[in-house]
Image (spheres, helix red, strand yellow):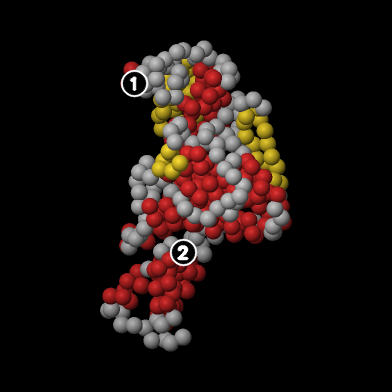
Amino acid sequence: MADRPEDPGTGDHQELMSLLGAWALSACAPEDTERVEAHLNDCGRCAEEALRLRDAALLLQPQGSLDLDPKLRARVLDGCLARRPATQPVPAWAAPLDSEAARLDALLNDITEDEWRTPVELRWFDDHDGWLGRTTTVSGVLDHLLAVDGLLARAVGLPDVLSDAGDDPVARTDARWAGARREADAWRSWREQTQALVRAAAGTGGRTGEHTVPRAGFGDPDRLPGTGPELPLSDAYLDRAFACWVHADDIARAVEYPYDPPLGPQLRQLVDLAARRLPQSIARRRRAGLAVSQARLTTAGTPGRTLHLEVEGLGGGHFYIPLDSPVATVSRTAAREAVAHVALDDVVFCQLVAGRITPDEAASGGEGDPLVIRDVLCAAAALSRL
């Protein structure tokens, strides 16, 4: 390698030097990565600096131990982006998937070879069959994520590794589990697909709700909010971020690894997604005759009874859930005169929605009609899926 640095006053050299921090964190666009690495072959000074930054990045990258401050990666990336804004920034609605995938990748980097075969229990609640479960392994969890994430990959024009397995998430998971493969293959395939999903989101340059995809392509119509033929791409990404966090926590519990919830602003997005799914779940349970509170007829689009859901914590907020129709409007009067008020911690609410705890285990503070509160907590649990 020639040890002859370019003139540091040249614009190209200075620009490439400014990219070294992002390159060390693997946060460069593909074309910038190629330019930086070509430059490192010719500039000894930058090559030395790049090696120093890459060594330092081992303590900051998601491949490092999660015993470090979980906010560290976000701060480093924010610092890099403050100096040189990204040419294709990751939209706010895709940031939770980016972060949760990076944290799961770090967890997987820390586990031992034997821990890949650790049994991991996946639980969910079914309206008719009650609490159900499947036991798999750490690599099996990744295969499940890969199978369901493939529906989103297909929706944004990326290859689907299970293109012949149809749209049903459970059938796709079973098809993936039926194949024999090494644990490392599941990890690599899942990571490559997730990184491609984040890059695809960055390529849209869109705001929340601006881009939509066909709802029919996701197999399970109750997995995402709304009922129309199209759904916001942002909701599809948030759904996969939620699943990534929940299943990473499943793995962490199985291998006894410390694992924190998402950062506050991103947890708030996941809580909001779950709260927006609640009206449809309440209505579905009522149509199935599973509700314990009395129904009240209301005209679509007019105010009806409302429950005040207060989610506490950094990811929390106040949500007013229509009880009589999923498309009923929630007026200011209805919000003020909510027939019940239930308070849940943000992580507890997400665990309930994920089917990891029961309504009875969700330590909540409630006021008002106890039957309404029971229906809403059960409807939250009924949002869970394999």
Position in image of residue 268 (x %, y %)? 43, 39
Horizontal side of 364 relative to 88 (left or right) equals right
Given residues 33 and 364, the one toward you in this image is 33
Pointer 1 residue: 331
Q: Position of residue 367 (x, y in %)?
A: 47, 18
Give the left or right position of residue 16, taking residue 362 as reference.
left
Whole-percent x and y of residue 222? Answer: 52, 33
**Which amino acid, by three-letter code, is at mark 1?**
Ser
Amino acid under disc 2: Ser
Q: Earlier in the sequence, mark 1 or mark 2?
A: 2
Check disc 2 and report its element: helix, strand or loop.
loop
- Image side of residue 349 versus residue 172, left or right: left
The secondary element bearing badge 1 is classed as loop
Of the two numbered discs 1 and 2 in the rendering, the one whose residue sits closer to the viewer: 1
**What mark, if any, has residue 26 been given in the picture?**
2
Quarter of the view holding residue 121: top right
Asked whether disc 1 touches disc 2, contact meaning CB atoms under 8 Å apart, the reply is no
Q: Residues within 10 Å of mark 1 (few under 14, many from 20)?
A: some
Q: CA distance from mark 1 to mark 2?
A: 48 Å
